[in-house]
Amino acid sequence: MTSAQRTSIPWIPMAATALLWGSAFTAIQVALPDYSPAAIALLRMAITVVLLLPCLFLGRIGRLRRADALRMAAFGLTGMTAYQVLLCAGEQSVDAGTAAMLIAASPVFTTVLGMAFLGDRPGRRGLAGLGVALAGALTVAVTSGGGSGSLMGALLVLGAAATQATSFALQKPLLKRYSGAECVFYGSLFGMLPLLPLAPGAVGQIAAAEGHRTLAVLWLGVGCTAMAFWTWSRTLRATTASTASLVLYAVPVAALGLDAVFLGNLPSLDAAVGGLLVLTGVAVAAVRRAPKAPEPVAERELVGSRR
């Protein structure tokens, strides 16, 4: 990368995106004592839909084609409903920083799905990197607190990583026809549907919850989804795919820092080593093929549902 390209790197929106996505793990921990995992997921998606609804009326979000409805629904059920419920359930016994390190293993599952259904061939270096990442994820899971509850929580978070990877595979063809905002809006809309019967209970939890825990749920929808979408979009418009991907490696670091500052949680040495293995393995797998030339990233490549 030339010096001219270095000066164009959008450090501020990249850092903001990492912090916003990283803060989701801490916000979930803050909300959990007064909110159930399903209620957090439902309220987060409802807030996102309400915030993006004006974009639909203004024409900035197009209509969903009937032919894409089934795939979009599957994306919403995996990337919104299952991912968020599993993550929140896992964080009942796993701290925010550890959860973020486990979610960082999502590319392992993405690659496995690509090999199984899309004919992808990651190559020896890619497979080696993903093997290291998987070993790191298992290390984090086994050393995430000792008790059976913590182990089950870690497995739930790994399940969230797997459902996130599935949603990425489902979303990829949609991004050729829909923007990131459209995927987030319709994905959240479909993701809410199976949780709607729980809406009365979620409203009751709002009435009984402490104020700061309700603010954490509000932040999940406003900050970790809507604001993060905007800063991530700015990142994608201003730089290349490889540079933008650095944000994904910074998210666990941001989550660990925020978890330490606001909740006083520090990962064990073994868990920290496992997290480092995850990030190293994913990084090795991601750079297995050097691009011929950097290309600008279109906003349609946004995976806005990531956190």
Image (tube, grey):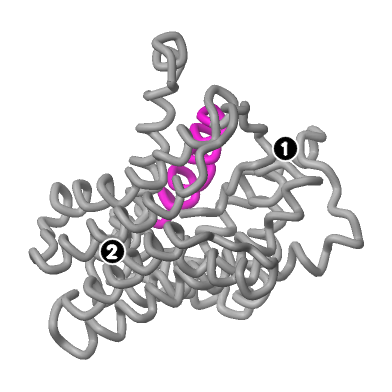
- Label 2's element? helix
Task: State yes or no: residue 219 in magenta.
Answer: yes
Q: Is residue 275 above or below residue 238?
A: below
**Residue denoted by label 2:** 29
**Residue segment shown in magenta:** 217-235
Residue occupying image coordinates x 30% and y 77%: 154
Using residue 260 as the reference point, say whether residue 70 is left or right of it: right
Residue at 57% over, 27% down: 294
**Disc nearer the start of the sequence (1/2):** 2
The answer to whether residue 211 shows anywhere in this view is no
The percent coordinates of residue 263 (x first, y second) are: 15, 56
Drawn side of residue 89 relative to residue 117, left or right:
left
Q: Residue at x 27, y 68 (%)?
A: 136
Q: Mark 2 is on which residue type?
A: Gln
Quadrant of res 246: top left
Q: Is residue 157 left or right of 118 when viewed as pictured?
A: left
Q: Which residue is mark 1?
A: 55
- Where is residue 300 shown, x and y percent of the image? 69, 39
Give the main secondary structure of the magenta stretch. Answer: helix
Q: Report the disc number at residue 164.
A: none
